[in-house]
Image: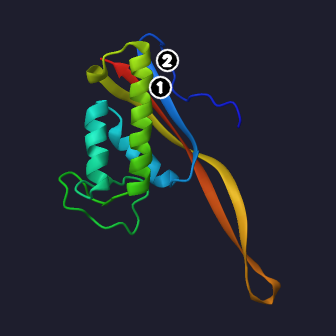
Amino acid sequence: MGDFGYSFEGYDPTRHVRASLREKQISHKHAREISLHIRGMTVEKARDFLQAVIEKKRAVPFRRFKRQVGHRSDPGVMAGRYPEKSAAEFIKLLDNLESNAEYKGMDLDRLTIVGAVAHKGILIKRFIPRAMGRSTPKNNVLTHVELVAREA
């Protein structure tokens, strides 16, 4: 595994805490939309939101990748979906972030997410054999997610 850095600028080890998820098989589009939505929330509020997404009570608003996405009845959400697999991975990442904050001696109730970023990871190339000696590519893009929180 390579040496990874963080894209968050202005990191102060005394005020900030960070956690990352590397090379996960989740949709980078879903991860981007979740990251955009939970930025600015407290950790508890973000966890409640992600639990509601898994239970299909709240939808994640899609802002960039919204073509052919149906509208939802949530207030303030036009196009949206319920990315359960990505939401479950984000909950694990929030648990990791809280553990890191607890290790640093920070107050968990005052943590606010100030940086949430999703990047495309490596491309896993595979091929499906077809008739007449042909093959069809089946590619899988892994995803990196970074969270940075600040004690308010």
Q: Is residue 85 visible?
A: yes
Query: Marks 1 and 2: which is nearer the front?
Result: 1
119 vs 83, nearest the viewer: 83
Residue 42 x %, y %? 28, 30
Which residue is rendered at x = 44% and y = 10% of the image?
A: 14
Instruction: Name the image colouring.
Output: rainbow
Number of labels in the image equals: 2
Residue 49: x %, y % from top left: 27, 44
Q: Is residue 3 left or right of residue 53?
A: right
Q: Amino acid at mark 2?
A: Tyr
- Whether 103 is drawn above or below 126: the answer is above
* Residue located at (56% from left, 53% from top): 25
- The answer to whether residue 142 is above or below residue 114 is below
Query: Element at badge 2?
Result: loop
Q: Is residue 68 above or below residue 32?
A: below
Q: Is residue 33 visible?
A: no
Q: Is residue 110 above or below residue 43?
A: above
- Measured from the top left, where is residue 83 in percent x and y? 38, 57
Which residue is identified by label 2?
11
Residue placed under numbered mark 1 in the picture: 18
Q: Residue at x 25, y 50 (%)?
A: 52
Q: Quadrant of residue 114?
A: top left
Sequence-wise first label, 1 or 2: 2
Q: Position of residue 27 (x, y in %)?
A: 50, 55
Residue at image coords 60%, 51%: 142
